[in-house]
Image (spheres, rainbow, N blue to C red):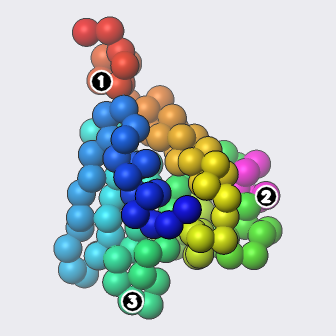
Amino acid sequence: MNLRTLQRYCSSLPGAAECLLPDPYNILVYGLAERDFAYFKTSEPERWRFSVKVSPERFLELTAQPGVKPARYRARQHWVTIVEVSKFPAEYLRELVRGSHEFARMKLPRARRPGAAG
């Protein structure tokens, strides 16, 4: 899976919105309301590294793998950064994004969750 395909997948999830944070942040953020579920660094030296929130158990599993590290500034909340997206199977990346999206969705008030009855 390449970065464009992964970004399109992030955009396709229910309620997802994309926001580019300008200098000095240079981060492309995908979120639900005020809850982020994925982001991509857009400037050097970390250009296009991809980060998502995972469970505490998955955090330990993933950070033990080459090419995955604790996300800068968000590791305490169990965010990981995947350094080279192309080295991971597409379905695995989609599973990580879906899980992170679900974490964000469940943090929203019930009435504001995508798919909630109006």
Q: Quick one: 98 or 57, which is closer to the camera?
A: 98
- Which mark identifies residue 102? none
State the predominant SS element of the stretch in magenta.
Answer: helix
Q: Decide whether residue 81 is among the magenta residues.
A: no
State the mark number for residue 44. Answer: 3
What residue would you read off at disc 1? Answer: 112
Q: Are marks 1 and 2 in contact (CB under 8 Å)?
A: no
The residue range painted magenta reads 57-61
Which disc is residue 61 wearing?
2
Distance of mark 3 from mark 1, alpha carbons?
36 Å
x, y percentage for residue 25? 29, 75
Q: What is the three-letter code of the residue carrying label 3?
A: Glu
Distance from disc 3 to disc 2, alpha carbons, whole Å, reads 27 Å
Q: Residue placed at 27% from the left, 53% from the top?
A: 18
Q: Quadrant of residue 45?
A: bottom left
Residue found at the very far bottom of the displayed protein: 45
